[in-house]
Image: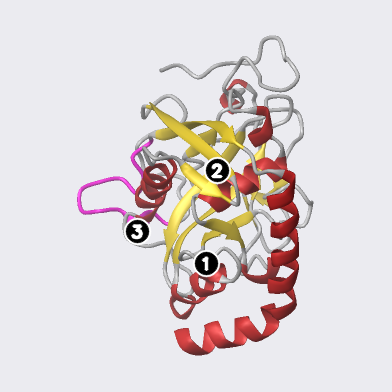
Amino acid sequence: MPANILSNFVPGRTTIDFLNPLLDDTGFMTTILPMPDGQPNLLYGEPINAIISGRSSPGVVDVEGFLRWATSVNLGVSCLGQTNGSSQLANLGDGKGNLTQGNDGTGDNGVLRWNYGDPYIGTCKESVIGGNHLRWWPQAKTGAYFLAVSVELSAKLGHMIALNGYNAGRDELVGNATNPNGTYWQGYRFNTTVEWIPAGVLLNATSDGINHPDVALPGQPSQDGRVALLTITQLATPSSKNAAIHTRSVSAVLALLPIMLIVAVTVTL
C-alpha cells in the first residue's frame, strides 16, 4: 500500500495515517546514531519498522495515551526511567529536524522495554536478561508514532541485537498488539489492527546502512523491509473511582521500587 501524505490536518483523530518522511529531503526511515563528537552519523542506523497511525483514537495519539496503550501490550519505560543504552535520533520529515527518542528532550522516556508481565519493575528484568524493546518518536501534526523495534540480548552481552532481532521484535509487537481479545490496562481497553507496508515503499529489504548487519539469517538481509502500520481504537476507559484506586496503588508501588529493584535484579542474577 502507498504511504499517505499530509493533506488537511484535523484536530483529534486525523484523516491520514502519517506523513511519509521520505517525501522530505531530510527524512529517514532509519534512526540516526550520534557519533562521539555529537555529530549525526547518517551512514548507519536501525530500521523504523512500525508506525502507530494518526487515525488511531484521540485518546491514544497523545503521549499519555500512547504510553498507556504500550503498557497494555506489556511494554514500559526503561528500568526506573533510565535508558540503559545510547540515545538515538530520528528525522521524520515533519520540519522538526533530528529529534532524540521520546518526547522529553533527554531520551529517558523514549525506550520502552518488555515488562515480563510486571508493569511496575518488569523492565528492570529486561534490562538484565534482554528481550523486546523499542524507541519511539511522535510525528508533528499527524498524531503518528514511529517505532524502531528489535529484540536485544542481555546486558552481559552488551545489549546487542539478537539474531533476526529487527524482524522478530516488530513481529512480536504486532502479535501482542493484535490479540483478538484486545489488550487491557487498568480499565482501558484497546483493539489494534495491522496493515503491512511492503518492502520497497518505506524501507528496503537490505543490510545496507543497518547498524547491526550481522544479525541476518543465512542468505537473508538483516531486516526484511516491511513496516507494520498499527491503528489503535480505544474501546473503554475506567470509571473515576477505579482511576483513583489505581493512582493510590501506583503511589504505593513507587514507594517500594528501590527494594523491589534490588530483589528483582538479585533473583535474575
Which residue matches tag 3?
A: 214
Image quarter of residue 239: top right
Q: Is residue 148 above or below residue 234?
A: below
Image location of residue 165, percent across then percent down: 37, 55
Which residue matches tag 2?
A: 147
Judge left or right: residue 247 versus residue 118.
right
Q: Residue furthest top?
A: 8
Q: Residue at x 47, y 64 (%)?
A: 117
What predominant SS class does the magenta segment belong to?
Answer: loop
Q: Which residues are magenta?
A: 212-225
What is the three-letter code of the residue carrying label 1? Asp
Q: Is residue 188 above or below residue 160?
A: above
Alpha carbon separation for disc pair 1 and 2: 22 Å
Q: Residues within 10 Å of mark 2 (few under 14, many from 20)?
A: many
Q: In this rendering, which labeled residue sits more in front, label 1 or label 3?
A: 1
Q: In this rendering, which labeled residue sits more in front, label 1 or label 2?
A: 1
Q: Secondary structure at mark 3?
A: helix
Image location of residue 32, percent across then percent down: 61, 47
The answer to whether residue 151 shows anywhere in this view is yes
Q: Secondary structure at mark 2?
A: strand
Residue 118 badge? 1
Q: Residue furthest left?
A: 219
Q: Residue at x 33, y 40 (%)?
A: 224
N-terminal of the two: label 1 or label 2? 1
Q: Residues within 10 Å of mark 3 (few under 14, many from 20)?
A: some
